[in-house]
Image: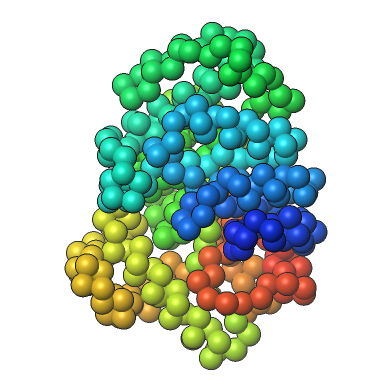
Amino acid sequence: MILDIALANYDLTAVPQDARRMEADGYGCIWTSETQHDPFLPLALAACATSSIKLGTSIAVAFPRSPTVVAHTAWDLQKASEGRFILGLGSQIKAHLERRFSVQFESPGPKLREFALALREIWKCWQNGTPLNFRGRFYHLDLMTPFFNPGPIAHPQIPLFIAGVNRYMCRMAGEIADGLHVHPFHTPKYLREYVHPAVEEGLRASARKRQDFTYTTSSFVIVGDSERERSKNAEAVRQQIAFYASTRTYAPVLAAHGWEGIGPELHRKSVEKDWQGMAGLITDEMLDTIAVSGTFATIGGKLRHRYLGLLDRISLYLPYPTSMGGAPLATLLDQLKP
């Protein structure tokens, strides 16, 4: 299992130095996400400052952008990184698309599928000179003159990952993508009984095998060298779990454990902005099932035991301040090795 890292500091002036340090530390990939900052700009700087670490979006929101705009950005990042870029795309939920991005919400699964297929057609046009002629329900693309064509690059096969929670997205990722970004709000049971069967159905539809596909996630971790430290950090994780569980989109995770009843109550409290009350609904059983707890010396072994065969890449979701440098990081990396 490969240990990746999520970019924490999006200050563009700090990215080159931070990226070089992450590469030297031994991480496999630097992931950015589209929350408070643009996910692509830091990777452009990281690409020019590093030579071996992979660089990916986890995730970029697809629908506020056109396939052509994303195709150009990904093409340039792939060229700058000499083949180290991974494009991770997600659909986002209705409220954010309509009220934060001011774009139409329509059939997110089928639309994201089309978006991904359109990207591949655009890249094929640029690399091979194939005439562009993509016609779908949501996107029509048939104009690419030489003036707007950036031309071929040395590493044209850009890995495309899809972020998915429900069965359609997981199956679609297995059919047309190179990997799946599993949401941090997950459990091994949900992965084993819900996600993997859907992805495998998609892989069969595309005549591919498990080794052709990558599962990656950011896992909730409660880490500390003392019981007091872990107890304090557990409350921050409990709060974050409550936030995700309040969103209807993530109901399949709750359903896998028979916890469906808590979803509406969490949602009601989120509307009331009762954040403390939300966290109080997350039981110790739920916390232990979703998060991995341990010391800096043991957390790597626990992660490997939990996810062996279920995930290929992992980063740590730490919604609290901590340090994973020096000896703790070396121990963690060693424990995750095959």
Q: Position of residue 179 (x, y in %)?
A: 54, 40
- For the point 55% across and 49% down, the residue is 39
* Total marks placed: 0
Dividing the picture into quadrants, the one containing residue 281 is: bottom left
Q: Position of residue 285 (x, y in %)?
A: 37, 75
Q: Nearer the viewer, residue 264 or 133?
A: 133
Colouring scheme, one of rainbow, by chain, secondary structure, one colour = rainbow
Q: Position of residue 185 (x, y in %)?
A: 41, 60
- For the point 67% across and 18% down, the residue is 151
Residue most extreme to the front: 147
Above or below, 300 against 69 in this view is below
Residue 54 visible from this viewpoint = no
Residue most extreme to the bottom: 228
- For the point 66% across and 75% down, the residue is 323
Above or below, 142 against 96 in this view is above
Q: Position of residue 7 (x, y in %)?
A: 61, 59
Q: Quadrant of the C terminus?
A: bottom right
Q: Nearer the viewer, residue 309 or 44?
A: 44
Q: Nearer the viewer, residue 177 or 82?
A: 82
Q: Quadrant of the N terminus?
A: bottom right
* Residue 43 placement, left or right of 286: right
Residue 174 visible from this viewpoint = yes
* Residue 116 placement, left or right of 278: right
* Residue 122 placement, left or right of 156: left
- For the point 28% across and 38% down, the residue is 104
